[in-house]
Image (tube, rainbow, N blue to C red):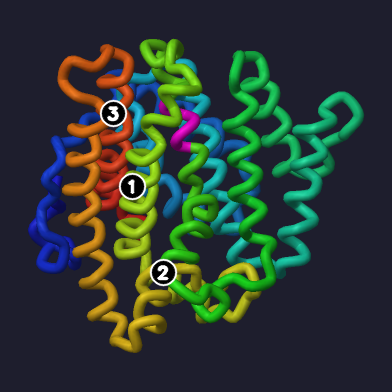
Amino acid sequence: MHGAPTHPLKSIIPPSILSEAVLHPDHENIDRDVMTYLVNTWEWPSEKHKKAFVSWNLSEVVLFMFPTGETERAKLACELLLLGFLMDDHFDKNTLSANASIVSSLHSLLSSPTTSTPQTTIDTMHATLFAKFSAYPNSAPILEAYLDMLDCHCIPSRGPSSLSSLKEYLKFRETDVGMPICVELLYWTDPSLSSITAQDRQLLRPMEKVANYHVSILNDVFSFEREWKAAESNNEGGALVNGVAVLAEEANISLMAARGLCVALVRAWEVEFLKLAEEVVPVDAEARLRRAVEGIKRRMSGAEAFSWRTRRYL
């Protein structure tokens, strides 16, 4: 998928060499259930914000990335990541200390659910979601990764001036944009991957790393203008955390040139991924490993398909 002819990035981003992304077969029902809950439960700052959230079709990022997930698990994954989007926008308007207070409360709700009492709508929504996930085995790493992502919004040194290199930025951005969550969700949502072992995960790790970089930097390309505006608001939580800005500062080039280099990196990572897949998981490898590789590949193509379709970044 390479965007509508009128998309402003159409001439900047060349087509991907990865397979076309597909949506989860039950995407309409999952989207309806999750969006109905979020729209009716979240405390919206205005009707305008609510309508914008609905118009972005955010569930597609999850349902493109995990089209083979068991329906109920895919629905929970959708609710978690969409709540993450809401928290991201909420944090942009806050001070770092206010964000830290919110996240500290969520840590308590996860670690001590029987002794911690939700105090706000945000607390209640998270406590409810944590309980749903906890009813399933092997869900703890997902929720821990989610809170790690939220912790990134409480770091005083956010932004390109605090990150000395693109390598350092990529390490930070993996967690900031939620890639460890997506890594865990792949194996948790797809029942065919339940037999993946720790040894398998170690073998797949280099490909997961490449996919994380691909999704993170492509997201930076698509979201740059939106994040620039958030940073211009001068709120602490809205600091500009974007690979385009980091590369521009490191290489002393214009933002436009840096964006072009980021696009070239994304497409180079696709070539690197396919090479790694061929070397690490040959065609005669066990079925679960080949399915895992396809799943990691879908994280890349799915995130890009969403980015072309959503109006969040326009």
Q: State the residue position of label 3.
A: 293
Residue 28 is situated, as x and y percent measured from the top left of the image, at: 33, 25
Which residue is at a point 21% across and 30% down the rendered structure image? 22
Q: Amino acid at mark 1?
A: Val
Segment colored magenta: 182-186
Q: Helix, strand, or loop for circle 3?
A: helix
Q: Is residue 185 magenta?
A: yes
Residue 94 is situated, as x and y percent measured from the top left of the image, at: 68, 66
Q: Are marks 3 and 1 in contact (CB under 8 Å)?
A: no
Which residue is at a point 42% across and 45% down the rendered structure image? 54
Q: State the residue position of label 1.
A: 210
Task: Measure the C-alpha gap from mark 3 to mark 1.
Answer: 12 Å
From this viewpoint, which residue is outermost toward the right?
A: 115
State which tag comes first along the sequence, 1 or 2. 2
Asked where in the image residue 6 lies, by quadrant, the reply is bottom left
Asked where in the image residue 236 lies, by quadrant, the reply is bottom right
Asked where in the image residue 126 lies, by quadrant, the reply is top right
Front in this rendered view, residue 131 or 186: 186
